[in-house]
Amino acid sequence: MFTFAVFICLIPLGFCKPLQTRDSQSLFNVTCHHIARVISSASAVYYPGSPQFISDIEHWAPSSTQVSACSVEPGTVKDVAAIVNVLARSTTPFSIQSGGHATSVGFSSTLGVAINLVRLNSMAYDPTSRTVTIGTGQTWSDLFQKLEPLELNVAGGRMGGVGVGGLALGGGYSWLSNRHGLTIDTITALELVLPNSTVVHVTPSSAPELFFGLRGGFNNFGIVTKITMRAYKQGPVWGGVLSFDADKVEAVNAALAKFSASNTDPDGNCLFNFFWSNGVLIAGTLQLFYNGPEPPSGLFSEFLSIPHTSKDLGTRSFLNFTKALSVVNPLKPTHLRVAFSSVSMPHIAVPVLKDIIQQGQYYSRPGVFSTQPFVSFAVEPFYWKSMVRPRDDAAYPHDVFVNPLNLFFGWPNATEDAAASSAIKGAGANITQALINNGQDLTGTVLYPNYALGDATIESLYGANVPALKALRSKYDPKGVFLRTGGYKFI
Ligand SMILES: Cc1cc2nc3c(=O)[nH]c(=O)nc-3n(C[C@H](O)[C@H](O)[C@H](O)COP(=O)(O)OP(=O)(O)OC[C@H]3O[C@@H](n4cnc5c(N)ncnc54)[C@H](O)[C@@H]3O)c2cc1C
Ligand SMILES: *[C@@H]1O[C@H](CO)[C@@H](O)[C@H](O)[C@H]1NC(C)=O
Ligand SMILES: *[C@@H]1O[C@H](CO)[C@@H](O)[C@H](O)[C@H]1NC(C)=O
Ligand SMILES: *[C@@H]1O[C@H](CO)[C@@H](O)[C@H](O)[C@H]1NC(C)=O
Ligand SMILES: *[C@@H]1O[C@H](CO)[C@@H](O)[C@H](O)[C@H]1NC(C)=O
Ligand SMILES: *[C@@H]1O[C@H](CO)[C@@H](O)[C@H](O)[C@H]1NC(C)=O
């Protein structure tokens, strides 16, 4: 019974609901008590009922939360190693959580031991190498707060509350990407606790294989405690949000396709969200960004000439810019169950955007769900020139340029999880077909792991890198300790 419960929990299914038994809970508790005995006073173990436990297991999407036997907040890398050592000697499942924005249950949640890295929140700037070394348990907003007085920035998350750990180990599409590439392209070193609890400093020269595997490979090789990444001088930026009524979205689509095809300014970027409910396109919001006090005239003029329902654009600090995005972004599913999925678009073309509108209408229509769903897709045009690297440079292959499309479904009732799963898959498949019908070549493209469905295959995410990643995982985790934590597994 116990083994069975653990087994089905390990399958990286977006909607897996493992069995929970009293027996397994008290077995897991033995591991919790063991951990409590080996950690220093810089760390702590919490049990159900305590406020710290509740905040440790909490996720952005409530459907990603599981009630663990206990949570542990390590405060030092030494304690992370001690925790891994205890877990390796047990059979207890565990989770590793940074910002808790994973939208697949089990990826950073567990019925066993929930490791929450929140205490790993350091930040140190090295002016000689122009890098910052940051603890992986903080959110990007907390980090931006620390960087602002230094007039520095990093290629991090676009929305504040996301965690450093997940975004940086999965790829990282940033407001700075059009100039500097993905977050993983700006990483110069990582501190890692291996499955055998050895602490290693991973650089391209000291541990090239792990440096490759960690940048896209999430928790397959251990727990990353610190990341060193390039820091860039940051002054005031221009940007914010424009909102549009549904009848203006066609005009926005035309402007998006044009911007995507013609923009060569690495400091300019945008992101467009479509919103549907009950089979109707209800609105669109456009986030605009320019890394400078004013955008060059003309860069966004086509967008700006479309009549909008609200406008919050201006020159502000980078931190204030990210805050302005959070204020208007309605994607705060305080009560909704959530699924993310992704489609990779070589080109952002008008016929495909038209189809995207149809898919949102079709899959949010009454009858698909008995309760009202909330559906939003985000189109994210990037500048191809800054975004490609050789395929074997990092676990997440980005040798073939694509614009990631983020599909988001939210629904209130757990009885409709299966309906949601098939709706989001249907929409993704139909949009992929629309790309093919549009004549786009998908050869060599993969899906972005940080947006993908929980049951996406590793081949669909890591493509030709899969054999190398499987070999690497079995080399560094021969006993399969980290197969007991959720996520995409290189097996
Ligand atoms: C509102 C919102 C906005 C988003 N915006 C962006 C965006 O602008 N750009 C973008 O690229 N993506 C974005 N994403 C997707 C985001 O990158 C992923 O959800 C990411 O995995 C979240 O990271 P986290 O640390 O918050 O999540 P968590 O759920 O804590 O972790 C995600 C995964 O990473 C693993 N992990 C986390 N930390 C570590 C560690 N230190 N060592 C080993 N494994 C670890 C976890 O075990 C888990 O499997 C967004 C998501 C949401 C919900
Ligand atoms: C687990 O241990 C904690 C702390 O000792 C205790 O409060 C709790 O009741 C235990 N839970 C189970 C299921 O044994
Ligand atoms: C950022 O926002 C705060 C609060 O609204 C404001 O006081 C501050 O002047 C802003 N700073 C910049 C540089 O925009
Ligand atoms: C999406 O594809 C499914 C399966 O092929 C089909 O039944 C459905 O009509 C399509 N929906 C749209 C809006 O194209
Ligand atoms: C969820 O769906 C079930 C079955 O359709 C229904 O009985 C229940 O009332 C619904 N709950 C909510 C909160 O809508
Ligand atoms: C832990 O694993 C690493 C990498 O495989 C290895 O170099 C190291 O010797 C191992 N340490 C112990 C104590 O087994």
Image (cartoon, rainbow, N blue to C red):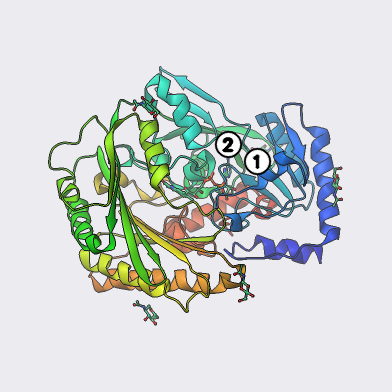
- Evaluate whether residue 129 shows in this view: no
Q: Position of residue 197 (x, y in %)?
A: 69, 38
Q: Quadrant of the N terminus?
A: bottom right
Relative to 108, does residue 377 appear above or below in the rendering?
below
Q: Horizontal placement of 280 versus 192: left or right? A: left
Residue located at (45% from left, 56% from top): 451
Q: Position of residue 194 (x, y in %)?
A: 64, 40
Relative to 418, does residue 470 appear above or below in the rendering?
above
**What is the crowding at mark 1: few (fewer than 14 residues within 10 Å), some, or many (at least 20)?**
many
Residue located at (27% from left, 55% from top): 244
**Residue ID for mark 2:** 137
Going by the numbered disc 1, the residue's amino acid type is Asn
Going by the numbered disc 2, the residue's amino acid type is Gly
The CB of the residue at mark 2 lies under 8 Å from ligand 1: yes
Q: Secondary structure at mark 2?
A: loop
Q: Quadrant of residue 150?
A: top left
Q: Position of residue 475 (x, y in %)?
A: 61, 48
Relative to 267, does residue 345 appear above or below in the rendering?
below
Q: Position of residue 67 (x, y in %)?
A: 72, 53
- Considering only order in the chain, which callout, 2 or 1, is on the residue closer to the N terminus? 1
Q: Horizontal placement of 40 versus 141: left or right? A: right
Which quadrant contains ligand 3?
top left
Contact? badges 1 and 2 (CB < 8 Å): yes
**Residue ID for mark 1:** 116
Residue located at (46% from left, 35% from top): 204
Q: Quadrant of residue 233?
A: top left
Q: Residue furthest left?
A: 298
- Evaluate whether residue 222 shows in this view: yes
Residue located at (57% from left, 72% from top): 416
* Residue placed most toward the observer, 176 or 377: 377
